[in-house]
């Protein structure tokens, strides 16, 4: 299996950003509905200080990435693009996902240092900074039904 490059990773990230943005909007609407039910009209989206919104959004992104990578080795965006996160020992087909600890470390580094994806441009095996830190790689591994 070959390593996924910058273009494939970026396309998957666009899909994932859309999913997380939709989830963030849904959380805002649900919180507004709860506030409306408890406190009454008017219905308004919650207004949070910038730091609180940023912190909450970062936690949501880390949870989203960690869950996808730990459970099935890919996020929905990576599923669409036929990419999978594997451990370095598991670069052959049919390996298990990286696990919760490794996925969490990887997700935190992605959120804290997103520009680290540019390392794929100079890395011989197209690994990003978070792959180096977590001992992972992103490989092309299309879903079984798409491969037929």
Image (cartoon, grey):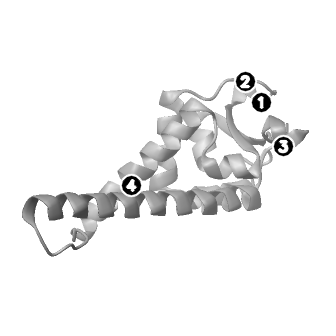
Distance, label 1 to label 2, CA atoms, is: 7 Å
Rendered residue at 25%/59% (across/down): 31
Label 3 SS: helix
For residue 78, side relative to residue 139 (left or right): left
Residue under label 4, please give it.
58
Q: Is residue 100 above or below residue 36?
A: above
Mark identifier at residue 146: 3
Rendered residue at 53%/35% (across/down): 103
Label 2 SS: loop
Observer-nearest of 36 and 53: 36
Distance, label 2 to label 4, CA atoms, is: 29 Å
Q: How many marks do you count on the picture?
A: 4
Say which quadrant the N terminus sits in: top right
Distance, label 3 to label 2, CA atoms, is: 18 Å
| Closer mark to the observer between disc 4 and disc 1 | 4
Rendered residue at 50%/56% (across/down): 113
Give residue 55's quadrant in the image: bottom left
Give residue 16's quadrant in the image: bottom right
Residue under label 2, please give it.
95
For residue 99, side relative to residue 117 (left or right): left
Closer to the chain start, of discs 3 and 2, is: 2
Label 4 SS: helix
Closer to the chain start, of discs 1 and 3, is: 1
Closer to the chain start, of discs 2 and 4, is: 4
**In contact (CB < 8 Å): disc 1 and disc 2:** yes
Give residue 136's quadrant in the image: top right
| Closer mark to the observer between disc 1 and disc 2 | 2
Place of residue 10 in the rendered image (x, y in percent of width and height, measured from the top left): 67, 61
**In contact (CB < 8 Å): disc 4 and disc 1:** no
């Amino acid at each position: 299996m070959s390593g996924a490059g910058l273009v494939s990773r970026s396309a998957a990230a666009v899909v994932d950003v859309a999913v997380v943005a939709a989830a963030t909007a849904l959380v805002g609407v649900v919180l507004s509905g709860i506030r409306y039910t408890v406190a009454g009209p008017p219905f308004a989206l919650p207004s949070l200080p910038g730091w609180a919104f940023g912190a909450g959004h970062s936690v949501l992104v880390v949870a989203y990435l960690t869950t996808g990578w730990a459970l099935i080795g890919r996020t929905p965006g990576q599923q669409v693009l036929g990419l999978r996160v594997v451990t370095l020992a598991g670069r052959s087909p049919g390996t298990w996902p990286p696990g919760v600890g490794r996925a969490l470390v990887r997700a935190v580094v992605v959120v804290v240092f997103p520009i680290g994806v540019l390392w794929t441009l100079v890395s011989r095996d197209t690994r990003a900074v978070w792959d180096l830190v977590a001992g992972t790689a992103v490989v092309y591994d299309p879903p079984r039904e798409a491969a037929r």
